[in-house]
Image (spheres, helix red, strand yellow):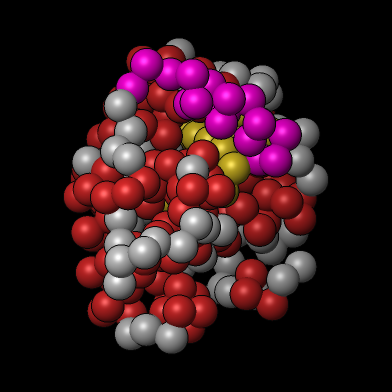
Amino acid sequence: MEATDVVPRPEVYLLHQHRLLRLALRSLLEGSGVARVVGDTEDVRTAVARVPALRPDVLLLDAGLPATARAEACREVRERSPATGILVLGEQRDDVGLIDLIQAGATGYLLADADLDELAIALRRVARGQSVLDPQVTGAVLDHVRHAEQSDPEVDVFTPGERRILLLLADGLTNRQIAHEAQLSEKTVKNYVSDILGKLQVASRTQAAVFATLHRSSLTVPLARA
């Protein structure tokens, strides 16, 4: 496990449609010391009502919920409890569904066949505001985004500094880690990220990270201008 992952165990709220699996997840997370479960439910409306009051670090969301229900959960939790990260736990490599979840506000996606160490790392990263994407779904997701009928801004709109920050976002770094890597203040990094999201016309770092991953080769080409 990476040294940067050694942080206090996050508080987690479980939204899963199957009661037995919720109980099993609670037992696994608490029994192993990976996380403290502050609540659980199978009902989206209950989760949306309770998460803002409990303010957990992470909402662990079942990807098996109906598409409209899981998208609603992502959107409303992000709106009402923006400090709560959303980690989706899925059983299928559903790239289209994953893109919808990211657009709705999910910050991470992990396949349910991941081991406990992988789940622990994902929870901690999402709790710190980082994006997490299971390696087994990355290729399919990026392929879908490449062929989606949407108009991404051209890479040329970004300054050299913004390009560097975008590449670090693609690597899943937090603002503090980016500041250290780029030798900038956290305030400067925050301003960079805000400008980048504005140019991309997106609301989340995860969406910016997906864009940067798709355009990594172009972002690494030096610009002539300063």
In the displayed structure, 8 sits above or below 81; it is below
In the image shown, does 17 or 183 lie closer to the viewer? 183
Q: Position of residue 13 (x, y in %)?
A: 47, 46
Question: In the figure, is residue 127 to the left or right of 113?
Answer: left
Residue 93 visible in rendering: yes
In the image shown, does 215 or 114 lie closer to the viewer? 215
Q: Is residue 138 rendered magenta in the image?
A: yes
Residue 18 image-quadrant placement: top right
The magenta region covers 134-150
In the displayed structure, 99 sits above or below 164; it is above
Question: In the figure, is residue 104 to the left or right of 108?
Answer: left
* Residue lying at 30% horizontally and 62% vertically, measured from the top left: 159
Most extreme residue toward the front, as rendered?
224
Q: Position of residue 165 (x, y in %)?
A: 41, 65
In the image shown, does 58 or 102 lie closer to the viewer? 102
Count of marks placed on residues: 0
In the image shown, does 74 or 55 lie closer to the viewer? 74
* Residue lying at 49% horizontally and 48% vertically, measured from the top left: 218
In the rendered image, which quarter contains the C terminus?
Answer: bottom left
Assign the magenta stretch its main secondary structure.
helix
* Residue lying at 27% horizontally and 50% vertically, measured from the top left: 157
In the displayed structure, 154 sits above or below 132; it is above
Q: Is residue 198 rendered magenta in the image?
A: no
Q: Position of residue 65 (x, y in %)?
A: 49, 19
Question: In the figure, is residue 62 to the left or right of 206?
Answer: right
* Residue lying at 45% horizontally and 13% vertically, measured from the top left: 66
Residue 18 visible in rendering: no
Q: Position of residue 33 (x, y in %)?
A: 69, 63
